[in-house]
């Protein structure tokens, strides 16, 4: 558990609320009167504990599940897609439920399939786009429906869409953009924080307080 005795209980509560309100370190420093470096130090601790928590509750996806990859950051302006020098992230989203993300080396079948087999129960119905890395999911024991973005097909009568996970990607990129660039070594913590915020939005403050006591 983090000790807040040096800053006082009231300031500690204010600090957590500023974090939950997604204020930057500079905004939080102005709101609390704390030094910006102090804020950054606490916020990093928060993110480390959140990441630890997110990994502890991952897995066990079943039912209707959406799968997709996306790319964050990178230096190649004006280029998009699987071939750019960006950080590739794989995402698993239960329909109308939680999301799990994992940084991957590349978007190949060899990289993605083991993650799916570890976190998504066999027999589940999975929805993907037309990327070839998903070609063998039926052989892995999943009911597989896919869409083809290249043909502007975003859904069909069977409900084959990945709107949920794509909505998460949009949310994550909008949120992370406000930092005006995140160092590669810090990206994992920010990604897991974004995942946590998305999953715990209704009870964010209570959940954060619990995590800080446990981890």
Image (cartoon, grey):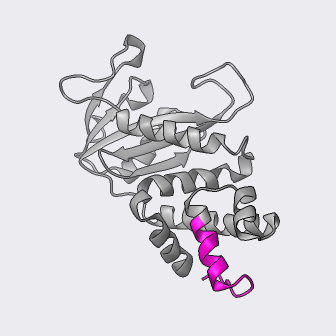
Quarter where residue 215 is shown:
bottom right
- Looking at the image, the residue that sits furthest to the left is 157
Relative to residue 191, is residue 139 drawn left or right? left
User: How far across and how far down the image is residue 13, in percent?
Assistant: 59, 76
Residue 26 or 88: which is nearer the viewer?
Answer: 26
User: How far across and how far down the image is residue 38, in percent?
Assistant: 78, 70
Q: Which residues are magenta?
A: 1-17
Relative to residue 120, is residue 6 drawn left or right? right
Residue 130 or 200: which is nearer the viewer?
Answer: 200
85 vs 28: above or below: above
Relative to residue 6, is residue 148 drawn left or right? left
Quarter where residue 14 is shown:
bottom right
Q: Residue at x 41, y 45 (%)?
A: 92
User: How far across and how far down the image is residue 101, in percent?
Assistant: 49, 48
Quarter where residue 137 is shown:
top left
Q: Quadrant of the N terminus?
A: bottom right
- Asked whether residue 5 is drawn in magenta, I would say yes
């Amino acid at each position: 558990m983090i000790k807040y005795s040096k800053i006082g209980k009231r300031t500690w509560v204010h600090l957590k609320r500023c974090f939950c309100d997604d204020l930057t370190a500079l905004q939080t420093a102005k709101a609390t009167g704390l030094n910006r470096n102090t804020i950054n130090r606490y916020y990093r601790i928060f993110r480390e504990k959140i990441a630890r928590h997110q990994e502890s509750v991952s897995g066990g996806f079943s039912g209707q599940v959406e799968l997709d990859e996306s790319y964050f950051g990178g230096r190649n302006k004006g280029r998009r897609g699987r071939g750019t020098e960006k950080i590739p992230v794989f995402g698993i989203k239960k329909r109308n439920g939680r999301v799990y993300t994992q940084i991957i080396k590349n978007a190949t079948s060899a990289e993605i399939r083991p993650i799916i087999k570890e976190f998504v129960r066999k027999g589940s119905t999975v929805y993907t786009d037309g990327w070839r890395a998903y070609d063998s999911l039926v052989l892995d024991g999943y009911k597989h429906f896919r869409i083809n973005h290249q043909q502007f097909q975003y859904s069909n009568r069977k409900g084959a869409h990945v709107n949920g996970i794509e909505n998460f990607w949009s949310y994550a990129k909008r949120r992370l953009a406000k930092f005006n660039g995140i160092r590669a070594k810090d990206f994992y913590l920010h990604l897991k924080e974004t995942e946590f915020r998305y999953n715990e939005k209704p009870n964010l403050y209570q959940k954060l307080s619990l995590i800080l006591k446990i981890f």
